[in-house]
Image (cartoon, coloured by chain):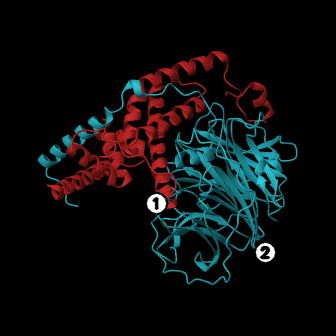
Amino acid sequence: MKELEEAPMRAMEERVRDAFGAAAETITTQDLPGLPAPARRTRITRSLWAWAPRMRTQVLVPAAAAASVAVIAAAATVAVPKLLAGPAAAPTGGALAGAPKFFASIQSDTPVVDIQNSATGHVVSSFGSPTGRWTFQLLTRLGEDNTYVVAALKEGTCSYRLYRFSIDASGHPTGLTLIRTLPGAGLEELAGSADGKALAYVSAACRPKDSWEVGVIHLATGQATTWTYPFNIDRSYTGVGSLSLTANGSELGFLIDATKFNGANPNGGWVLPTDAPGGLITSHARKVLLPSTHVRDVILSNSGASMYVVAQAVRANTTRRLVLYNTATGKPVRVLAHIAGGINSALPVMTLDASGQHLLTYGYDSSRRVTMINVVTGHQTTLKLAVPLITDGGFTTAAW
Amino acid sequence: MRVTAHEADARGPGVSPAPQRAERLASDQLVDELYRGNALRLTRMALLLVGDRASAEDVVQDAFISLYRGFGRLSDPAKAAAYLRVSVLNGCRSVLRARKRARLRRAVPSAPAVWSAEAAVLAGEERREVLQTVASLPRRQREVLVLRYFFGLTDSEIAADLGISRGTVASTASRALAALAAKAGEQA
């Protein structure tokens, strides 16, 4: 667009200042609430808050134990749409030994899946949704053979379509296949098992709009079980997220953030057998992680014997620690790595590769940093992407 | 709640001990001062980005909660103020993105923006039109305009907050003003 001449520019600047000033003055000192008391707010409750910032007075209503899941009668392979040219990334890190060669991502403000070189961040290929009315929103790895699931949202609805695709040796997508539709599911996160047989999700269920819904779908049989957790307890935000599955899909790991629940404090990292009956998610789950004000994200190891936890150091506000916990004892085993970050590299998301040895971590960070960590050696590399992966936290948008 | 020394030790090696009581009190006082000195301006800034007072207040409250939890000792209030500003920017981005998704889901409706006719808070049709046009601009353009013409930051400071170059700040502002002028010309 043609730039303004100086005089009209000055005039427009004054109009903007005037308008900003007038709008700003609608808030006065008397309008401000007091300094807030410190409270635990993790990525998951932040996501909830962002979705419904004034839910404080909502009445809790118990939800049904199981939800019906629509199954596509015949799965058809969809032709992969024409590849799009991806944005150039600024390479800053080298390869992490043994890590997957590529990772898939949905970068903020774009509805396409990018497949990026893990060593350089360079976008090798991209693809969009097969139909214009469905836009890609979430992504997770499924299986050991470079297979992934991407969730597409239908515009104007609360319905998601789940597609499976693979990445070939040259970093191009193949075999985009529609596998399932989830009606009435406001998806927040996805997680797949390394054996490719189970898929977990958490949604801020559209109906009813008063509880989180966590589901595990056994893809071979189509069987699905769902559990719930209330949004709001005693006028405090709650949330469940940071989903992960063991390699065989037998256990689901997750993080709960809440302040009160029938006198007990459910905050912390949990593990649920995926064959547990539906209902309140904490009924059949065991808490494996001691509560901490600084836990940011958790992920189960492939075996379920360990849980990787990203915690914020008490004093060092610019770093996070990756700590290995024993899920049987709930005790920390050792600090695996320190993850550098700017003052606002908050709320990281972790995703493991199929081997269970390499973590990909990211968050909403204006520096657009992605960190990759070998959980055995602690070695890490960092990539800087052209645009951030997420800008609002709480969504699984990258996997390898 | 601050982690006690016992809890910190139980979490294994490499964990810093919790700050002592005197240090916590000093931090509390510093955060309190930062709140009294910055909350109004930050809330107003957030209002210009997200449009409604409730969301703006939530964003700023979140930023101070984050500050309180993340700083064992505040040695440089100037840096804390910048931290808060960027925290609020990130919070506003989160609100706007979630609001977009909520509209897709036909979930919770957004509160009317303060400059909308429905809100009827802001007087002056011309001011409302300017703000509505600003709200329709790409995110970066909106943020640059707010930081420059409301917060009064220099281009260097804006560049630092947004993680972009000074040149990008200047060109972004120019494009935004040109877009506003073009819209005003259409409406004239």
The chain carrying label 1 is A
Q: Picture coordinates of residue A209 (x, y %)? A: 60, 52
Q: Choose top left, top right, bottom left or bottom right for residue B23.
A: top right
* Residue A315, numbered label: none
Q: Residue at x 53, y 36 (%)?
A: B62
The chain carrying label 2 is A
Q: Earlier in the sequence, mark 2 or mark 1?
A: 1
Residue furthest to the left in view is: A7
Q: CA distance from mark 2 to mark 1?
A: 35 Å
A230 relative to B54, above or below: below
* Residue A221, numbered label: 2
User: Is A289 left or right of B18, judged from the image as shown?
Assistant: right
- Residue matched to label 1: A109
Nearer to us in this view, A99 or A146: A146
User: Is B182 left or right of B14, judged from the image as shown?
Assistant: left
Amino acid type at circle 1 is Asp
